[in-house]
Image (tube, coloured by chain):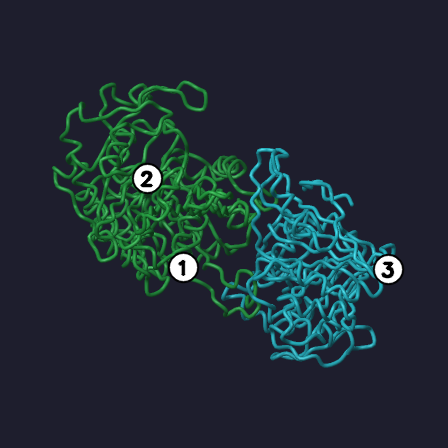
Amino acid sequence: MTTLLQNPLRAGLRIDRLPKPVIMVIFGASGDLAQRKLLPALYDLARERNLPSEFTVVGVGRSPMSDDQFRDRMHEGVQGHSRDFVPQVWEDFARGLFYFAGDLNQPEFYGELRTYLEELDTKRGTQGNRVYYLSIPPSSFPVLLESMVTQGMAGTPETVRIIVEKPFGRDLKTGQELNAIVSRVFHEDQIYRIDHYLGKETVQNILVFRFANAIFEPLWDRRYLDHVQITVAETVGLEGRGKYYEEAGALRDMLQNHLMQVLTLVCMEPPAAIEANTVRDEKVKVLRSMVVMDAKDVALNTVRAQYSRGFLGGKAVPGYREEGGVNLESITPTYAAVKLHIDNWRWSGVPIYLRTGKRLAKRASEVSLHFRESPSHLFRRYSTHPTTDVLALRIQPDEGISIRFDAKVPGPDITMRPVNMDFRYGTTFAKKSPEAYERLLLDCLYKDQTLFARADEVEYAWKVVTPIIEQWTQGTPADLASYEAGTWGPKAADQLLNRDNRHWRRL
Amino acid sequence: MTPDPTVYAIRAPKQVPLNQVDQELSRIWATQDDGQLKTRASTFNLIVFSGGVALDLENTIGAVAVQYPCRTLAIMDDPTAPADTVATEVTAYCPLGSGGQPAPVCCEYVTLRATGNALHELYTTVLPLLIPDLPTYLWWQGIFMPTDSLFSNLRVLAERLIVDSGTPGTAADLTTLDQLPTDQAIGDLNWWRLAPWRELTAKAFDNEGRLAALSEVHRVELEYVGPNLAQPLLFLGWLSSRLGWQFQEQWDNGAVVFSGPQGEIEAVWREVPGTTVGALATVRLLINNERYLLIRSGVIADCVQLQLEEEGQCTFEQVTALGELRLDELLAQELQTNSQTDPYYREALAMACTLSAP
């Protein structure tokens, strides 16, 4: 879908190719995502001259709105959320924005939409190319997808792609059902399951760090590593999404997708090439090697908890059950800690601890690799703070990499202290990273699926997580631990590691 | 010196003997007690030569410190410097981030002032001051003299020579640049100023339907703000070399003629009034009798506007911001590029030299 170097004037330019002219149809365009994320990202791509001039957006939604009203609404979002707002460039970009109102649950609507898009093809020169962005609940998928088939809108991988937002199901069964529904209409090459975490520079840097440097990879296995911790901690509460979160909880909202994606990148073998399927093959191998827990394992190796009222940033915040849209007796976990095992040559015997939660002490996402103790006890009695070496990959904030090791304190005696060697993106590269959606939307326009989840990847991740969901669902409210908002989670999570003579890294 | 207002000096520049530069820099980093973390990260060495013309130190400091942590060695041809010796000053600059707070990306800044022999032999002074095992770039801001011993010695030290063929007064001469060895990596900041123009021109022909029209271009008209001709010449050099046009002759009226796959192409350029010296103002490609492509700046503030006119109607329009043309942004783009020399720049440069002295 790219215009390569057929145009001799493109050779050597910063952007030596552009996506082909295309209409991006955003279903659910009156929602927050379009205004706060998608349009600002598309505008920034246009401002940096990454989009063809024919690029067109059609917002589709139930609310009646004129093109101009839609543009005004998106203008607010772009002005507030883009990286650099240039009014003149916005004017130019906004000429390619349109709105088409209708009821997505009515099959006849799709015939009208098809005709409208064909008219736009003539007007805008978009040549029948489409990207459909489904920013709508999965319950609307069946009518939409079936109508697309009826109306001949599914095209081929060359001309049509579809972007699907998470959640990709609620468990293994629904995940498989959703994949089946989508794949009845679209070929896997056309399906882009978007997880914005994969668009983050620091997540992508995990692959560069591991496979572009020779010094780390030899240490990256069970011979040298004691365990791995992956933390995605949020300080925010529900932000008005109580109804959604009640259904999702921490496992579905974060762990099954964001944390598992990071885990696979940290644990995968080197791919044969940086290509969509070779990278995803390796990620799937990790998921397939993960030990699926039985009921006893779930009781032993997982912790779930819900936040109660507390103080964050000097302000009182309500408990989970006091949030809008939440059942007063809800047992939805807002915190999850899980100990996982990967049964393969590289990782056997190295537990992977994942934790994620809302209203925690600090917003921080990090992967830390904890090394085994040195085999010799030569210096143990000199250490003021006995520690093991740690390699930490910080995803946010303060993106960077640090290594903790012991050093001798200057002086006549042998005294040791742990020291940190710290690389921070912010102190080395002043250039601002593009937003995750910019990278992912551009990749989709270029037909590059490397940073998008494949069907089997989603299903294998569900296979690991679903037994935990099932056990947690069968539990009683008494199984649910509690933690005060603004802390680092429940004591039970600390005990999960303390039992193994380990502790969570203080972030 | 008065640095760019967007940066601040961690400590006022301090004169130190040459052999104490490293110790002084270590002292600067060791005594930070303002609670702000400043990591002594470095990504490259940058040698900046400012010759005996009007200097732009403020921009130099701002341009470097705002973008990258690095060690900058600023060499100044200073007639007031003591004879046969090098006066050295050391400081470090950090940019001010949003809200006026210091950002943690800082730049070590060593100023070396010398004149006469001390200046010409300065490269041996520079050698031990470079951070080992990091790329070194030479940004030559002064008058461009390739036979100068300081230039030829420093050039060998550096992985890439950075010049600016568009700077008023100190413009690197295109012909001299073209005569540098082909393995000399060159980065011309003026080439980056042309990037929006080149990209917009290319964009007009990305469409498969319009691609064929490229071979129908029969006349090129350029307007620029004089007197520096480098931009129109490089643009025309790029366009003609990319499209395989061969230079034929220059007419008495100044127009040049190329032969292209579909026949002759005539190109003219003329000076127009304006404030940005050396800047391209208008590019007009006449495609056939009814069609022309017009790219111009100045119509929409801070933007370049492209219009394709066909049979009296505008059939294609695009607006691009000219937001990346500040000195620090141009330098950042140059330092970010991986390739040593853009081969298309060398092509364009060779043709530009042919056009400037047919």
Q: Are marks 2 and 3 on the same chain?
A: no
Q: Secondary structure at mark 2?
A: loop
Q: Which chain is cyan?
A: B
The disc at residue A215 is 1
What is the C-alpha distance between the residues marked 2 and 3?
76 Å
Amino acid type of disc 2? Ile
Q: Dot 1, how many residues are within 10 Å of its Cα: few (below 14), some (14-19), or many (20+)?
A: few
Q: Quadrant of the N terminus of chain A?
A: bottom left
Q: Kindly identify the residue that appears in the image at 23 percent across and 47 percent down.
A: A461
Given residues A9 and A368, the one toward you in this image is A368
- Residue B110, position as x, y percentages in the image: 71, 52
Residue A469 seen in this snapshot = yes
Chain letter, disc 3 residue: B
Looking at this rendering, what residue extends furthest in the front direction? Answer: A412
Residue A260 in the image: x percent, y percent? 29, 46
Image quarter of residue A396: top left
Specify the quadrant of the image occupied by residue A99: top left
Query: Both on one chain, marks 1 and 2?
Result: yes
* Position in image of residue B270 (x %, y %): 79, 64
Q: Amino acid at mark 3?
A: Ala
Identity of the residue drawn at 58% across and 52% down: B42
| Badge number at residue A136 | 2
Q: Residue at x 41, y 34 (%)?
A: A363
The alpha-carbon separation of the residues under discs 3 and 1 comes to: 49 Å
Image quarter of the C terminus of chain A: top left
Chain A's colour? green
Mark 3 neighbour class, 10 Å CA radius: few under 14, some 14 to 19, many 20 or more: some
Q: Nearer the viewer, mark 2 or mark 3?
A: 3
